[in-house]
Amino acid sequence: MSNIGSYEERVKNFDWSIAEKELGYKEGEVINIGWYCSDRICEMGKGDNLALFWENAAGEEKRYTYDDIRVYSNAIGAFLRNLGVKNEDRVCLFMDRIPELYIGLVGILKIGAIAQPLFSAFGDESLFVRLENAGTSAIITQRKHALKVRKIIDRLPNLKHIIIVDHDEKRELKEREIAFSMESERVDTLEIFPTKAESPSLLHYTSGTTGMPKGVQHVHYSLISQYLTAKWVLDISENDIYWCTADPGWVTGTSYGIIAPWALGVTQCVLDSGFSVEAWYRFIQKYGVTVWYSAPTAIRSLMKAGDEIVKQFDLSCLRHLISVGEPLNSEAVVWSEKVFGLPFHDSYWQTETGSIMITNFPGMKIKPGSMGKTFPGIIGIVVKPETYEPINKSGVIGLIAFRPGWPAMMRAYWKNEETYKGKFKNGWYLPGDRAWIDNDGYFWFIGRDDDIINTAGHLVSPFEVESALLEHPAIAESAVVSKPDEINMEVVKAFVTLKPGFEVSEELELDIMNFIRKKLSSLAMPQEVEYVDSIPKTRSGKIMRRLLHAKEWGEEIGDISTLEND
Ligand code: PRX
């Protein structure tokens, strides 16, 4: 029997207080995610239970009990506090998937500071805009990533502390750098900051349509949604071995890669290495993973590697599979059922929603290609694009819309009230996606309603890439759209015009690609650069990405009456 039991019954009798009761929380009381993820589990007498199995590409292994999480997060919290970090100060986590990243987030939350996780593959410019916008006061990082911080530190007067978790005594610490070794001391007590439901917890940056990345601000009360969705959708319980493949630089890696599993007291596994089919199957077998939360790009890559390789491993430990981040094609669901004997259950949500909104629940009939139904307590519909009126007809495509008010809903875009307000229309929150609903209430995803590129499940803003491209000495103008890709679904493609004196060449294309990879990240790096004579723009000077996009995808171009250079 799954944790959710009957979906219909849960919908009928739903109230978020179910989670509040299970967590022992009452309205108005202190609620601190850091405490829930460690101290509470220990107070329940489960301090010796394993919280984390960790392994890296070199085969190094570490394991941590809940008591370890408690004392080491205390150590991080105490260290930050001694440096003068206060509640609501922003503390950035900029690390590979090392234990300090996971435990560090718990420590930051315990002192009431705001955790700002950033993907460690970000280049210096991606890092700079996010640290500057957040006014971040401390960053916890590794030696190799500190080099990127050093490059931008002069432009970040608010960044007072660069905390290096793997400092080598033989090297010199540079300006504002300080060494910290998490496991040097088991700090038994730490005064937990008395955060309340609405106290800020996390700041996750996500790509915008037009402007720079937006800081999505969450609160400690988000735990209520994260806990219950993990319990009912991921179906995890204390005896599971759980593997969430997402990096905590992104929201899945925090909501369901740190907060929910640890608040549920489950043992989770982390593999700190890049993707490899064999390494993944071996990892599942070695740790006996029972619940696996992954993403379509990875599933498509596994699928491509074929069925034979699956047979070389004993994966009979697997019990429940879930996917998130991009459209899960029906072939992937059918394939996983064939090779693992289990279908992948799609789940749909976003950084702003903080927790799963639409999903195929355990035990529910899966319609391959559909995202499933709304989580109990979530009111989700599709609305007309122009009027935001509900579409009360099945099969008609509209904008996905949710009635605001679930616990994990973002509370603000950091210092960007106008954009935040723009996400609400007619009393609905609009995530910016299009879908249709069938007669049984299942949602079928169509696509985004803006120019944001979803490559391998990661959102990339064309605006951010276009701006970075303009800093390349050879580029006069740029436009960025997605192009289709078999594995990643979409990849970044750049159209550029060159400044006088620069010649079209393959070397230049490679140079442009690398320029973006270093400045932004490998995800944002164009997989193709096309040289053009001019960039299509509207008469008001806006880049007509729609036109370039349509060409790449072989779609109808539509109305081009506003085109300037036709
Ligand atoms: O467009 C939707 C797509 O990813 C966006 C959210 O991205 P992000 O904020 O980075 O969060 C990713 C992980 C929660 C959505 O607006 N998306 C997410 N899940 C799905 C999806 N598209 C199709 N199917 C999904 N299951």
Image (cartoon, rainbow, N blue to C red):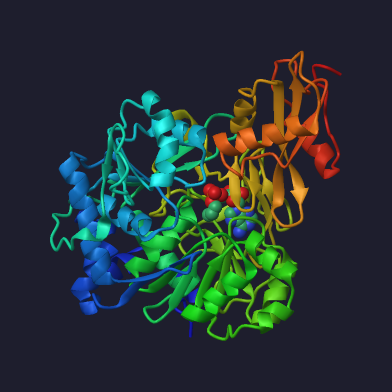
- The image quadrant of residue 215 is top left
Residue, far top: 500
Residue 464, above or below 204: above
Residue 354, above or below 555: below
For the point 24% across and 53% down, the residue is 76
On the question of residue 108 being in view, the answer is: yes
Q: Nearer the viewer, residue 201 or 82?
A: 82
Number of marks in picture: 0
Residue 543 locus on image (x, y percent)? 71, 24
For the point 47% across and 52% down, the residue is 251
Residue 177 locus on image (x, y percent)? 29, 38
Residue 326 falls left or right of residue 122: right
Q: Nearer the viewer, residue 15 or 220?
A: 220
Residue 466 locus on image (x, y percent)? 64, 28
Residue 20, above or below 199: below
On the question of residue 27 being in view, the answer is: no
Residue 16, above or below 514: below
Residue 5 locus on image (x, y percent)? 47, 80
For the point 81% across and 40% down, the residue is 552
Q: Nearer the viewer, residue 421 or 196?
A: 196
Q: Nearer the viewer, residue 131 or 184?
A: 184
Residue, far front: 170
State which quarter of the image contains the C terminus: top right
- The image quadrant of residue 440 is bottom right
Residue 427 falls left or right of residue 550: left
